[in-house]
Amino acid sequence: MKKDLWIGGEYRNASSYMKLKNPFNLEVLAEIGIATKEDVLSAINAAQQAQVEMAYLPSFERAEILEKVAQFLKDDREECARLIAMEAAKPLKAARAEVDRTIMTYTFASHEARRIHGETVPMDGAPGGQGRLAFTVREPLGVIAAITPFNFPMNLVAHKVGPAIAAGNSVVLKPASQTPLSAYKIAEYFHRAGLPAGALNVVTGSGSKIGDVLLKDDRIKMITFTGSPEVGRYIRENSGLKRVTLELGSNSALIVDDGVLIHQVIPRIVTGAFAYQGQVCISIQRIFVHENIFDSFVEQFVSETQKLKAGNPLEEETDISAMITRGDVQRTQEWVEEAVINGAQLKLGGRSEEGIFQPTILVNVPSGEKVSCEEVFAPVVHINTFRDFNEAIDQVNDSKYGLQAGIFTNDIHKALQAARKLQVGGVMINEIPTFRVDQMPYGGVKMSGMGREGIKYAVEEMTELKLISFKTE
């Protein structure tokens, strides 16, 4: 099967193709078009031409298009889940959950499309402002470039495309090279839903080559990107005056305080650590447990983790499957071995087989180890101990990242202290940092990025505020 480029509301032949393989069994799924510079410019042209129509498309029509896409996803839920499972090696039950979240994301986008509004401005609050009526409106930015990762190939596309369309923008989408089929499926849904031709374009191929064209073209008014800090920094430094939203990952931490009923929270924590092989931006990577419950916590955490089943992502009972590439398996192996050499204790896992890295638990890991201070993006978690609560907060903050953090505690004062002092974009109290619902503001500080996703907040990022003032006297 060949997948060409989606430009101007139709598939267009590419000059060359790359083989897309299933990460689990390495079977070829499709041949994916590789976009040239000319192809990307053609996509930008199509988006620019469609922008005129999109800007004047009534909000209720944009909302109805988004609602139709959500319905198509509902109708094809199982097909979409299996598509995600095949191209991303996401266990089927997790893939179904992603499709359900994608439906909700487009539904939220349809709601927001109907209520984009400004406000009145009390001009007479300042001397000389009397006799004037003023109000603001929000207008679409124009053409938005969206660059998405492999780990949520439908829902993270929705978090960029949904608010962009809701706000009346047009989009050039560059999905991850490993997961383009989900993006093409979404483009087909929008076409069926009646989106103007050219309002959504999908180009696949080299991220650096496509990205450089998008960065340099002045017709692109905003870049919304989810991916690595290195690429995010490059985009920020080379995007000129374009608006930029960056979600750059983390090494998310969790504090488990003394007095917590650990048998109640451990199943939830295991899910947060190992769901989708740990390949989640807010996957739990660092756990800090009070010394009074440390030994019991580790014992129960290991026992619960051993219940996870590794295997084919298309099998119903599978919890853990292949990582996205064999290269990532090798990198993870090296990081774990390096940590053990430098003093960490391996409690579980630490090995791989046929692309599947076994859920791995380390304890007493030095803070300078890559499995602690870098984003491991793998089924690897470490558990360290603390005595004083302020010490735990300091350990969480001892990171160049700051996306989300979690804390389990029975002490409201400690909960509020954590909320105030943790240097992250979101603090989850009595919850894992991996928690996210799709309408909430989502984003980080430090090297975890800038700007916020979450449909309402993304719409604000993707619109320009205009003031209109009438002199009435």
Image (spheres, grey):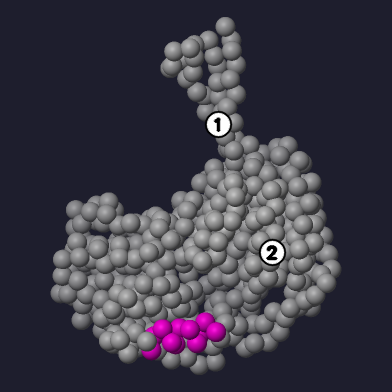
Check residue 118 in the rendering and tell me which mark sits there, or answer none. Answer: 1
Quarter occupied by the C terminus: top right
Q: Which residues are magenta?
A: 327-337
Q: Nearer the viewer, residue 71 or 308?
A: 308
Q: Is residue 336 magenta?
A: yes
Q: Secondary structure at mark 2?
A: helix
| Residue at the image position 43 percent from the left and 76 percent from the top | 376
295 above or below 202?
Answer: below
Residue 158 percent location from the top left of the image: 60, 57
Q: Is residue 125 visible in the rendered structure shown here? A: yes
Residue 298 percent location from the top left of the image: 26, 81
Q: Is residue 36 magenta?
A: no
Type of amino acid under label 1: Gly
Q: Is residue 371 left or right of residue 294?
A: right
| Alpha-carbon span between mark 2 and mark 1 | 35 Å
| Residue at the image position 21 percent from the left and 80 percent from the top | 296
**What residue did someone put label 2 on?**
210
Whether pointer 2 and pointer 1 mark residues with C-beta atoms closer than 8 Å, the reply is no
